[in-house]
Amino acid sequence: AAAGRLEAAGGEAFASRAAALERRRERAALERQAAEAGATRAAAAAEEADRKRKWTECRAIVGAAKAALKPARAAQRQAAAWRTSLMKHSTQGESDVAKTTVSEALSAVKALQEEEYDANQVEEAQAKKKQRC
């Protein structure tokens, strides 16, 4: 009976040691997984920080580009306004010139119509010119 108890106690001790060994293996595996998860999390945090840094740099570049474009846009608007003004003035000037030309032509036609026709007019004008010279 004592041998049976000893054998039973030895079996229990063996089983206890085997269970402890299995728990240590499981714990080591979990610690490895935790370390891998920590490394993955650290890499993700570093990547996110790098992305935020790049985003901030890009925002600064965009802001500088917009600031640089403001004077160019203002100059473009001013040039467009000047061009519109010149076109309006040019069109108005052309209109005035056209009106003046038409007016002069009409008055010349009216003056010719009011004159009496003289068949000897050309010869008389040439004779007067010769006398002056």
Image: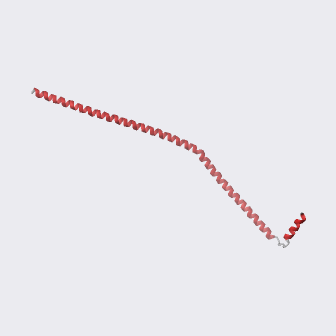
**Is 63 situated above or below 83?**
above
**Residue 104 rendering spot, x and y as whole percentages:** 76, 64
Q: Residue furthest right?
A: 131
Q: Residue furthest bottom?
A: 119
Q: How is the image coloured?
A: secondary structure
Image quadrant holding the N terminus, namely top left
Left or right, 128 with reference to 11: right
- Residue at 77 percent across and 68 percent down: it is 109
Q: How many marks on residues?
A: 0
Left or right, 126 with reference to 14: right
Left or right, 27 with reference to 124: left
**Residue 31 rendering spot, x and y as whole percentages:** 31, 33
Q: Quadrant of residue 3?
A: top left
Q: Residue furthest left?
A: 1
- Residue at 50 percent across and 39 percent down: it is 57
Q: Quadrant of residue 10?
A: top left
- Residue at 66 percent across and 53 percent down: it is 85
**Residue 13 rendering spot, x and y as whole percentages:** 18, 29
- Residue at 52 percent across and 41 percent down: it is 61
Image quadrant holding the C terminus, namely bottom right
